[in-house]
Each structure stands twice: as C-alpha cells, then as structure tokens.
Image (cartoon, rainbow, N blue to C red):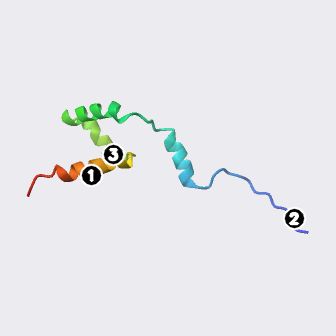
Amino acid sequence: MSSASLRIYYGPQDDDVAAEAKAARHTVTVPLGEVLPLLADAVRSERTWLRDFHDDEITISMDLYEVILAYQHYRRPPA
C-alpha cells in the first residue's frame, strides 16, 4: 500500500493572478468625460506632475483607440 502524502496549500501559484488582484485594489473606473477636461487643462498648463505618470499604462476601448489612431494619421502636417 502506498501512503497518502499531504501537501500544504499556499494559495494560487500564478503570479499573474496575484498581481492582477493587487492591481485591482489600486484602480478605479471613471468616465472619460470626467477625467479628460482635467488632463487637457493640466497639459495646457504644463503641470509637472504629469511627468510622474508618463510611463503608466492605461486601458481604453478598441473603438477609442482606432479613433485616436485615425486622428493621429490625419492631423500630420503635409510634407
């Protein structure tokens, strides 16, 4: 007869799950219309605190991303 061995459960082993759970505690979902005017004002006013967030990633919808890409393409000055 083989003896049964017990293992200690330490929780999820997937680091992505743990990181995702931790990140979820430090995020908030707000309408773009609430944040955009404030960010636009901060850019116009050249607020230095914007540099603190320069490398932060944001999540946007695919349709907004496509509109931004189209805007970026068409606002380029002619050569």
- From this view, report whether residue 45 is shown above or below residue 20: above
Q: Amino acid at mark 3?
A: Leu
Disc 2 is placed on an element classified as loop
* Residue 3 disc label: 2
Q: Residue furthest left?
A: 79
Query: Residue 66 at x, y = what percent?
Result: 31, 51
Along the polypeptide, which appears first: circle 3 or circle 2? Answer: 2
Along the polypeptide, which appears first: circle 1 or circle 2? Answer: 2
Q: Amino acid at mark 1?
A: Leu
> Local crowd at mark 1 within 10 Å, few (<14), some, or many (≥20)?
few
Q: Amino acid at mark 2?
A: Ser
Res. 41 image quadrant: top left
Q: Which residue is mark 1?
A: 69
Badge count = 3
- 18 with respect to 55 (left or right): right
- 23 with respect to 50 (left or right): right
Query: Residue 2 at x, y = what percent?
Result: 87, 68
Q: CA distance from mark 1 to mark 2?
A: 62 Å
Q: CA distance from mark 3 to mark 2?
A: 59 Å
Please name the residue shown 30% across and 35% down the image. Answer: 36
Q: Residue furthest right?
A: 1
> Local crowd at mark 2 within 10 Å, few (<14), some, or many (≥20)?
few
Q: Quadrant of the C terminus?
A: bottom left
